[in-house]
């Protein structure tokens, strides 16, 4: 990935999600996601002031960090192999289903990733099917929420 500075930010609509363990597999790009939300982390800070501290304000002490849950949305395409089988395995208690999920922001030519978020030990924790109505013309959208143990920016 290029580590060059540029004056103009990248567009948010050129991205891809890789759900595989060891890089892109044959099923990873079968259906692209429409939206990715919730990328982030938070470090908890505790306040502590010993009685003999010279300052009248407490110290800030580093605590644990928390990784946000990431929400993926895509149109329903009837492909059970990519998402449903993974959700089903996790629901049934298969502890080997933790994956490394990569979310890549692509350049304008959609050839090279310019930034990548890596979710370590990700697993699906929530699935929401589409809202169906006989009067609508919108695309049926399904939503998948992932929990991970770590997020790294590369």
Image (cartoon, grey):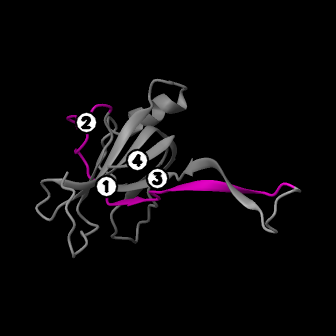
**CA–CA distance in space, label 3 to label 2:** 19 Å
- Viewer-nearest of discs 1 and 4: 4
Mark 4–mark 2 contact, CB under 8 Å?
Answer: no
**Residue pointed to by mark 3:** 70
* First in sequence: mark 3 vs mark 2: 2
- Viewer-nearest of discs 2 and 1: 2
Q: Is residue 154 left or right of residue 121?
A: left
Q: Height in image: 112 above or below 89?
A: below
**CA–CA distance in space, label 2 to label 1:** 17 Å
* First in sequence: mark 3 vs mark 4: 3
Determine the secondary structure under disc 1. loop
**Quarter-of-image position of residue 93:** top right
**Residue pointed to by mark 1:** 33
**Quarter-of-image position of residue 48:** bottom right
Residue placed most toward the observer, 100 or 150: 150
Give the residue drawn at x 29%, y 67%: 12
Q: Height in image: 100 above or below 12?
A: above
**Residue pointed to by mark 4:** 152
* First in sequence: mark 4 vs mark 2: 2
Residue 95: horizontal and vertical position, in percent?
51, 24
Determine the secondary structure under disc 3. strand
**Residue pointed to by mark 2:** 23
Range shown magenta: 21-50
């Amino acid at each position: 990935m290029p580590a060059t500075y540029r004056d103009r930010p990248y567009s948010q609509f050129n991205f891809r999600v890789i759900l595989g363990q060891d890089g892109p597999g044959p099923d990873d790009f079968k259906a692209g996601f429409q939206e990715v939300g919730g990328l982030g982390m938070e470090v908890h800070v505790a306040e502590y002031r010993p009685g003999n501290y010279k300052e009248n304000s407490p110290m800030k002490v580093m605590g644990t960090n928390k990784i946000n849950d990431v929400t993926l949305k895509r149109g329903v395409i009837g492909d059970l192999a990519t998402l449903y089988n993974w959700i089903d395995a996790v629901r049934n208690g298969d502890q080997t289903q933790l994956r490394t999920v990569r979310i890549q922001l692509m350049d304008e030519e959609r050839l090279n990733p310019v930034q990548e978020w890596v979710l370590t030990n990700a697993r699906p924790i929530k699935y929401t099917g589409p809202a169906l109505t006989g009067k609508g013309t919108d695309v049926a959208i399904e939503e998948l929420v992932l929990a991970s143990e770590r997020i790294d920016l590369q």
